[in-house]
Image: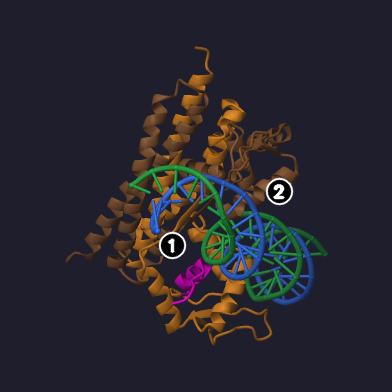
Chain colours: A orange, B brown, C blue, D green
Amino acid sequence: MGKSRKIDMVILGLLEHEDLSGYDIKKRIDNGISFFWKGSFGSIYPSLNAMEKAGLIIKAGDQENVNKRAKYLYSITERGKKHLIAWLEDSKATNDLKYETLLKLFFGGAVGPETTIKTIEQFEQDISSELQILKHYQKNLSKSLKQSDDHLYFYLTVTFGVETYEGYLRWCKKAKQMFRKETAPH
Amino acid sequence: MGKSRKIDMVILGLLEHEDLSGYDIKKRIDNGISFFWKGSFGSIYPSLNAMEKAGLIIKAGDQENVNKRAKYLYSITERGKKHLIAWLEDSKATNDLKYETLLKLFFGGAVGPETTIKTIEQFEQDISSELQILKHYQKNLSKSLKQSDDHLYFYLTVTFGVETYEGYLRWCKKAKQMFRKETAPH
DNA sequence: AAAGACATGTAAAACGTTACATGATTGC
DNA sequence: GCAATCATGTAACGTTTTACATGTCTTT
């Protein structure tokens, strides 16, 4: 089946639901899946062009760029669907995590508990605000589970995020406590 | 302070504890922190050369490469320590996550629950076996917490992994149940 | 004798981000 | 009129992985 760049799969997955422009795709990524996957214009537009050449997607006929600014809506082709499905059917997946926070924690001995606590608190704040957004999505999706079968997939993805983030926050509290115990006069 | 490639920080962090060769560093990464950070020889050796030129590290005097295969042990310099500490003192951290598993779940609607369950089960297996290793480290570290202040940093890092992974496994069970309910005859 | 771990390093390719370049439309 | 958003795209840069290249030492 050849190589499958991951950004290609993200785009094919989104186009499998609806026709979108590059700009639309960026928004879908930012709003829907950014907590576990990111994408920039600099990767989206080249991917769109490459996949069009490869026949995985085509420009949808309905362009409203008459006398207006250019906007190219893309549709997934049959070939694109096959490509997407072949990737989905392979259960192997690489999950690539790079936690700079954990790196700073792991090497925190060089600067001591106070500094490390600050790093943890920064992490805590970032996660807290993202968690609120995720919970909001989760609530809406749980209401509409019966409307469409697809919603269950989205709901479980968001739920993964919510539960992971809640676990992070529990860990933050515990970690801070352990550092404070160490710092406290014995 | 210039740019700070992350692999440089990993290496400096490790060298702050002990002198190591490139090969040693690879092993330390693989054994100790691979669950949240990875590194290949192709990035380690060039980083080592660049940091030596920049005066952040130096080849340790004690090389046993007389009539033996070459092995270069590196030491961190004062300048390297300052560089490491400056990075540690900045509480901002970027955590870059790419879960291909979640991507396959999110777009699972295109192939249905059976296929998606397989992806989840694969994830479950991968996580289970990594969790066992992490728990083993955690147990050893918890025993030696009083021996060295550094052990608390390592212990909390591993604990982060253990708790996150346990959360993943709880989520896997729940997700499979929800898919099976959907698939079951109503 | 062979396999596997030890040991360093380079080259090519892949991938992605950031910044730049350009311009129209919409809402205040 | 101005700011924000819509909209596409390229170029430079940086990072990292993968594969290649080479050879030794240790254990079975």
Q: Determine the residue positioned at 30% across, 55% down.
A: B175
Chain under disc 2 = B
Label 1 element class: helix
Q: Which of the two discs, 2 and 1, sits closer to the camera?
A: 2
Return the disc, 2 or 1, that comes first in the chain's sequence.
Answer: 2
Q: Is residue B40 left or right of residue B5?
A: left
Q: Check disc 1 and report the residue beneath it.
A: B103
Q: Is residue B48 magenta?
A: no
Tell me the tag on residue B50.
2
Tell me the tag on residue A65.
none
Q: Determine the residue positioned at 45% across, 40% down.
A: A168
Image coords of residue D24 (percent x, y): 54, 49
Q: Is residue A184 left or right of residue A17?
A: right
Type of the residue with mark 2: Ala
- Can residue B92 be seen in this snapshot? no
Asked whether A97 or B168 is in front, the reply is: A97
Chain under disc 1 = B
Magenta span main SS: helix
Image coords of residue A145 (percent x, y): 33, 61
Q: Quadrant of residue A62?
A: bottom right
Label 2 element class: helix
Type of the residue with mark 1: Leu
Report the magenta residues as a range: A1-15
Q: Quadrant of residue B112?
A: bottom left
Instruction: Give the farthest residue toward the left.
Output: B185
Instruction: Give the farthest residue toward the top.
Output: A186
Q: Is residue B103 above or below residue A175?
A: below
Q: Is residue A16 above or below residue B32?
A: below
Image coords of residue A19 (percent x, y): 50, 77
Asked whether B87 or C20 is in front, the reply is: B87
